[in-house]
Image: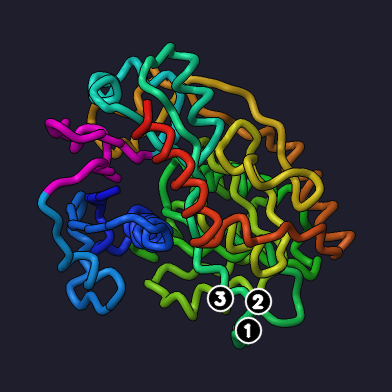
């Protein structure tokens, strides 16, 4: 089978990282693979040095049986005489109300990383076959040594890794943390995000003012904020320095930092009715109840998505507080899952099964 993967693997982003790992999972198979870059942002990795991917990028075949496009739906193009696969992620429900819908109907098959996404698409009665294939990760990093960050030692550290956008719902995390924990308790909230530090601090101060837990902002425990770009080594050290990863997001398809938290032996707290519950449960973490509600945000990735015609999951903050308190008081790590389920080999085998089905239909 000749496979062409078109994906943004040359960009610094979650999409870029996921695309790199998709290529490497496909490359474990006994199929002919070529890859080509596409760019959906200006965060381009100009000094691209991954020799495995560079070799696949230099590879070409006269024809292809399957073309996998890992792109936003509006970038998808149907190619004649091949099986067209759209590999995408969806963080909201009721996608049928968006212009993306017609692109989904053009694909011969859709790959998504979670059953929550498949459930949402089926609820809209999408006729295109949907296949759930989780994202791959280089699991060898979990067995390596990383120096903990000195500033985070000796304290129980809750931590968050993600963009500083409304979808990630940092307001819920800040509310839960500051309402549940007194400033005298030996506990930190570490926020690794991106953006202007002054804007981030001002936004957090505004949230605290509106919470009115303390009249004086100086009485709130100070968050440990990191907003500079960190290397993979640095991020891995952050995981090793912390204890409980919290992702209160309104919508997640996969959430790589949550998977990494598990891989490094930490215990995650996540929102129910999101893609994270495919691999996080109450045995290896905490799943916080949520309710489905209309999307309401000013942070729209594109003007025509994340409108209130769509749905997402709003975490129950009181339940989030209880889970954080339990994590802090117990200080016991829950059961760690077998991370082999995310390896290139395992995800490659899952991809192989799906590809054999769609090419033999």
Q: Nearer the viewer, mark 3 or mark 1?
A: 3
**Residue 10 versus residue 296 in the image, above or below:** below
For mark 1, give the secondary structure.
loop
Query: Are the two marked residues, 2 and 1, in contact with CB atoms closer than 8 angstroms?
Result: yes
For label 1, count other residues whose C-alpha is less than 10 Å away and answer few (under 14), some (14-19) or many (20+): some
Residue 46 image point, x, y percent: 17, 73
Q: Is residue 178 left or right of residue 326?
A: left
The residue at 64%/79% (across/down) is 143
Q: Position of residue 145 (x, y in %)?
A: 62, 86
Q: At 53% from the left edge and 38% from the top edge, which residue is drawn? A: 114
Q: Residue at x 26, y 41 (%)?
A: 66
Residue 8 in the figure: left or right of residue 243:
left
**Viewer-nearest of labels 3 and 2?**
3
Q: Which residue is mark 2?
A: 241
Q: Does 42 sit left or right of 247 as displayed?
A: left
Instruction: Measure the C-alpha gap from mark 2 to mark 1.
Output: 5 Å
Q: Quadrant of the C terminus?
A: top left
Label 3, label 2: how many angstroms apart (C-alpha)?
15 Å
Q: What residue would you read off at disc 3?
A: 141
Residue 35 placement: quadrant:
bottom left
Q: Which residues are magenta?
A: 63-88
Can I make out residue 194 in this image? no
Task: Indicate which disc, 3 or 1, sits on the residue closer to the N terminus.
Answer: 3
């Amino acid at each position: 089978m000749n496979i062409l993967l078109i994906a943004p693997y040359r960009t610094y982003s979650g999409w870029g990282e996921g695309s790199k790992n998709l290529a490497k999972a496909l490359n474990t198979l006994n199929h002919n693979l070529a890859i080509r870059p596409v760019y959906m942002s200006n965060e381009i990795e100009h000094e691209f040095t991954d020799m495995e991917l560079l070799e696949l990028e230099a590879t070409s075949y006269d024809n292809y049986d399957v073309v996998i496009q890992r792109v936003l739906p509006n970038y998808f193009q149907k190619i004649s005489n091949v099986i067209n696969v759209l590999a995408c992620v969806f963080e909201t429900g009721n996608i049928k109300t968006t212009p993306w819908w017609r692109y989904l109907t053009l694909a011969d098959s859709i790959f998504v990383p979670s059953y929550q996404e498949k459930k949402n698409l089926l609820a809209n009665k999408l006729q295109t076959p949907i296949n759930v294939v989780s994202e791959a990760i280089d699991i060898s990093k979990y067995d390596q040594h990383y120096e903990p960050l000195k500033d985070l030692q000796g304290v129980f550290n809750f931590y968050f890794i993600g963009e500083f956008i409304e979808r990630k719902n940092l307001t819920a995390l800040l509310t839960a943390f500051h309402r549940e924990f007194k400033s005298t308790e030996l506990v930190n909230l570490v926020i690794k995000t991106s953006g202007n530090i002054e804007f981030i601090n001002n936004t957090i101060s505004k949230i605290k003012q509106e919470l009115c837990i303390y009249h004086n902002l100086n009485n709130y425990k100070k968050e440990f904020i990191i907003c500079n770009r960190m290397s993979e080594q640095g991020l891995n050290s952050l995981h090793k320095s912390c204890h409980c990863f919290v992702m209160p997001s309104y919508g997640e398809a996969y959430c790589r930092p949550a998977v990494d938290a598990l891989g490094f032996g930490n215990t995650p707290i996540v929102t129910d009715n999101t893609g994270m519950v495919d691999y996080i449960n109450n045995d290896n973490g905490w799943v916080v109840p949520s309710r489905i509600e209309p999307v309401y945000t000013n942070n729209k990735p594109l003007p025509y998505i994340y409108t209130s015609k769509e749905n997402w999951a709003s975490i129950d903050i009181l339940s989030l507080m209880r889970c954080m308190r339990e994590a802090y008081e117990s200080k016991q790590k829950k059961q760690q899952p077998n991370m082999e389920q995310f390896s290139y080999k395992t995800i490659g085998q899952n991809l192989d099964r799906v590809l054999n089905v769609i090419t033999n239909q």
